[in-house]
Amino acid sequence: MKEGQPQAIHLKDYKVPPFLIETTDLHVELNEDETFVTATLRFTRNPDAENEKDLMLDGGKDLDTRLVEIDGRELLSNEYAIDDQSLTLFGVPDSFELKTKVAIKPQENTALEGLYRSGDMFCTQCEAEGFRNITWYLDRPDVMSVYRTTIDAEKKNYPILLSNGNAVARGEEGDRHWVTWEDPFKKPAYLFALVAGNLEFIEGTFETMSGRSITLQIFTESHNIDKVDYAMDALKRSMRWDEEVYGREYDLDIFMIVAVESFNMGAMENKGLNIFNTSCVLARPDTTTDAGYERVEAVVAHEYFHNWSGNRVTCRDWFQLSLKEGFTVFRDQSFSEDMGSETVCRVDQVQMLRAAQFPEDAGPMSHPIRPDSYIEINNFYTATVYEKGAEVVRMYHTLLGEERFRKGSDLYFERHDGQAVTTEEFTLAMEEANDADLGQFRHWYSQSGTPQVTVTGEYDSDAKTFTLDVEQFCPPTPGQPEKAAYHMPLAVGLLDSNGDDIAFTAEERDLATVRKDGEYTAVLHLREPKQTFVLGDVSEEPVPSLLRGFSAPVKLTYQYDRDQLMFLMKHDSDGFNRWEAGQRLAIDVIQEVVGQIQAGIEPMVDERIVRAFEHVLNEAVERNDDDGLDKAMIALMLALPSEQYLGELSEIVDVDSIHAAREEVRGAIARQLSGLFLSVYKLNKSEEAYAPEPTDIARRSLKNAALAYLMQPSDTEMVSLCVEQFEGSDNMTDTSAALRLLVNSASAEARDAKEKALTDFYNRWADEALVIDMWFQIQAACPLPNTLERVDALKQHEAYTLKNPNRARALIGPFCNANPVNFHDRSGSGYRYLADQVIELNGINPQVAARMLSPLTRWRRFDPGRQKLMKAELERILAQDDLSPDVFEIVSKSVEQE
Ligand code: PHE
Ligand code: ZN
């Protein structure tokens, strides 16, 4: 262990802030070489805190302090002390005004936390602890203050000067000008924002439910102003939805969004002034894919929803992060479900949970949605806090039902408006508004790990009962060898031999039935480690449909045979479980082939998977004119489970056999059903202009799913079909799908076509950063041999830079996360590559560097040879000097934990 290692912070050590800051007055003078920040803060002693003589403020090591003044008197050098991260004021009075002046250099801030430059503009990112890099402060979310901010900058290059709230004064002098902004709502420092630049904007208005008119503005650099109309529409839809579904109205008179090219995350909910990564706000048909459009809509909604779930009611401390994030993700998920197809959204959500959260929960960084400790809070913006957090909120909704859930959220917002609270307050509001007992439910906040639920079913033909024996078990995770049983909703249906739902009965205390359009579902409350549910009035031996809609974030086991899965795939009234049955069937069949490959036997693909896909495709052909969202579902049903998820399901991940087996199964399906795939492809081609409408998106997804199978063997004819789509398409969804298939094709026919397509694509889009990101992504994700050589060469490309997080992630991310055969190459070259990137990025942008590491942290899941290589790379990283706390935390937890 090296000296001065970063220390962990624990939830149990929480103390209320020693002082409160009533008002925060900032004066920011922006210059090219040095920026001066003068802060005038009105402090009063917190009546709830223990009386301490000295006051310690947070600050980053790059604050160059020029002035410290209390109540108008400059302090002597023995009246305060400054170190790398704090300013201590000795012997302060109970109430006083502090004035400090610091000089900072945003142009050198490559970590992109605090005030920094994105291209020619200045912008900020303060969550979680970036504000301390701007000025000395009590930088913690339970210190809430009213802000008044004056920005002073050169006029020509920074005509637009923005901060939170309303612009209340402005003026100019010579070649400089200034604007003062006032935010009437108290907020924690992490919601502060400032932007200065030569920006253009579009404007809209929204009339709220109480009849107030809100000005909406979206700002970008001039070359992107043609790509923000969709975000404006999405914003209006979000504002309406939050009024209708949660009764939440917007509070300020103006709401602004600014798009920036260099940003560590997706976007940020700063009060009245959201700042977005361009990747989450820009959209134009020829540059943005359908998935991109959906992401813009979801992220715009997410950040807007934070205005209530996050800003009006905020977090007491960072251990409570899921209070705002889990809830807000659930809100944006429900919004997307309402805008498009509920089932398609649900499948996407669950795929994401399984791809990112389950592995995290099974690895060295496993943590509860409310963690007990952290070294670097930036490392806890995780799939667990966000996505599992959203699942936990969804379970309240499932257990209580729509109406009672709303009663709970109303109480929560009303009671805690203007406060900084904990997850406990959320649970209490849900409990007290509904007179419900959620005592046991609280384990979801404190326990980590993915629960396993095992179900067996037995039919009694005399009693006409179907008995479900359910067991739950949560495996040990770091620091938590044993778990208490969870309270979770188990949504269950029973299918008769026609495939219709049986209207069964269940014991009163377990039952909340959902009946709609031929669907009959009971929500069973699972509470015990082992619990038996007797379902009555079951006229014949049923096939159970379990965990409908993925009613709890668990791994469910039930011994289905393949015929039952085919039956569920065809008939289940629950769309999610129809998809799930198809996945289970595919997993079963692929795993069988994995076994054959490992045993050195000739692989044999079970015919039944081909027949199941044939049925799905026939349905697609026969019901082509339905024109519904079903097409998106069909496309999802045609997608085999990913190699990563298949790996996740095996004890030791055999990367090569999984890849080979999946390709074998895909090949069998592609060969035997090529005629049908071609019909589906042709039926779903359209000459109509692009629209990001759910039904059009569905149609394109089905068409491109068919094209992917057609390109599996990729003979000359199919390659030309693909080239034709690449060249003829008017939208990025079809263009990029075709490019990806050409790049991934191993056939000789595709060889020249792919190089030409890549060159043409680059030349066509060289000025569109987000499209060039995609160009890097597609090449880095290619499963063919020699991809690492290409990735290495691309690192030298003129368009590549580690300094822009989107660009860095575009090359490193897909190679390490979506390209298992190449990343896990036996030689260890992929591991070495990732470690090199992390080491280099550590000095530039620690937060992004640390996030890249996750594939290496999973080393325990692989064979001994790979384990050794992966661990060696982690140790090489750990041995570096100047390791950031971000990277240190993840690497050290990965190698130490046994
Ligand atoms: N709070 C942001 C969101 O989820 C995410 C974020 C975290 C952005 C940290 C930047 C930094 O909406
Ligand atoms: Zn969020």
Image: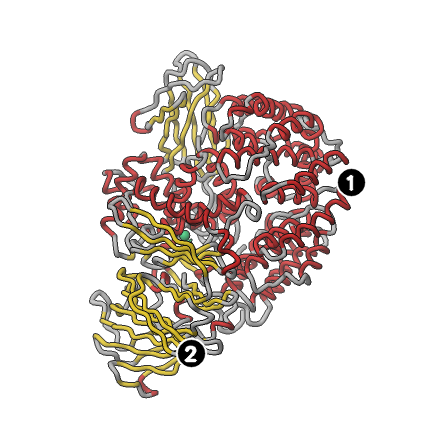
In the drawing, does residue 751 fall left or right of residue 791?
right
Badge 2, how many Cα within 10 Å: few under 14, some, many 20+? many
* Residue 742 on image: x %, y %: 70, 43
Q: Residue furthest top?
A: 462
Amino acid type, label 2: Ala
Question: Is residue 481 visible in this depiction of the protein?
Answer: no
Q: Is mark 1 within 8 Å of ligand 1?
A: no
Locate residue 272 relative to residue 663 in the image: left or right: left
For the residues labelled 2 and 1, the Cα–Cα distance comes to 61 Å
The residue that disc 2 covers is 103
User: Which is nearer the eye, 84 or 575?
Assistant: 575
Residue 7 lies, with reference to residue 365, above or below; the image says below
* Quadrant of the image occupied by residue 257: bottom left
Residue where numbered disc 1 is placed: 749
Is residue 498 visible in the rendered structure shown here?
yes
Q: Position of residue 410 (x, y in %)?
A: 26, 44
- As displayed, is residue 574 above or below residue 80? above
**Residue lying furthest right in this view?**
748
Q: Considering depth in this image, is 741 or 329 the residue closer to the camera?
A: 741
- Label 2 or label 1, whichever comes before in sequence order: 2
